[in-house]
Image (cartoon, grey):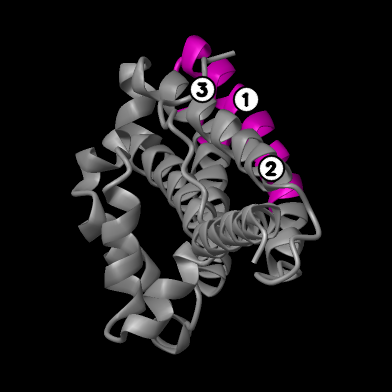
Amino acid sequence: MPASAVSSIAMTSSSLAAVLLCATAAAAFFSVADARTTIGGDLVTKTCADMMSHDWGWLNISEGDKFCVSRLRMDKKRSAAAKHPRDLALIAMDLAQRAVADADAKVAAVLHSGAAGHSSNNTAEHCRLDYASVVSTIPVCRAMVNDYNKKQHLLPNNDYFECARRLRRDTWNCAFRVAVEDDLSKLVGEEAQEAWLRIELVDGMLEEMLGVVVNDHDPLIWS
């Protein structure tokens, strides 16, 4: 066989190998979440452990993966039936929505009762605006996740993370404001923190669903 033909075949084989390698790498990247569904065992435990391995430092104040597992298992039936992190992301969103509603109701009760001082009332009013924004955004984010197809990425990953970013910003704003108001913190601090942490859990589950890890998990700047 002529040397040129051998060289041509070698180049073709090399090119094919490179294509196959890229395809394999891409498949591995987009199937990070799927891998946990085929290994067997408890999807909730596996997914939470994987999420916490990605430096979700702020969730550590609530025992990290224990917080993740305990909250997702609040919906016993759906968490037990979950087949993919997408299912857990939907559960996390529903749980977050309830927590935000509970926090907002508690803040509204404080305003109505006049239990807090003037400064705390201003903070409480800001919190209600923050929570109103979350309440209007969660259904949009949930619809995006509900329509997610792991084989056909119809939306850019950033669209999902931008939705989560808005939720994190608003719940963190309220949690921060409440934390620095001693009187208000005693009245609604627990509910405000729970709402924020459940939104953090939503963000973490989106990462697991997409198989993409965002390096910055710090709270967004208070505004």
Residue farthest toward the front in the current orientation of the protein: 2
Q: Can residue 11 be seen in this view?
A: yes
The residue drawn where x is 32% and y is 82% is 39
In this orientation, which residue lies closer to the viewer: 177 or 47? Answer: 47
| Cα–Cα gap, marks 2 and 3 | 13 Å
In this orientation, which residue lies closer to the viewer: 135 or 66? Answer: 66
Considering only order in the chain, which callout, 1 or 2, is on the residue closer to the N terminus?
1
Residue that mark 3 sits on: 220
Residue that mark 1 sits on: 125
The residue drawn where x is 54% and y is 36% is 168
Location of the C terminus (image quadrant): top right
Question: Relative to residue 144, is residue 41 depicted above or below?
Answer: below
Q: Is residue 15 magenta?
A: no
Mark 2 or 1: in front is 2
Count the numbered circles shown. Answer: 3
Please state the extent of the stretch shown in magenta in the rendering.
112-138
The quadrant where residue 181 appears: top left
Q: Does the magenta stretch include residue 126?
A: yes
- Position of residue 47 measured from the top left corner of the image (x, y, whole percent): 35, 65
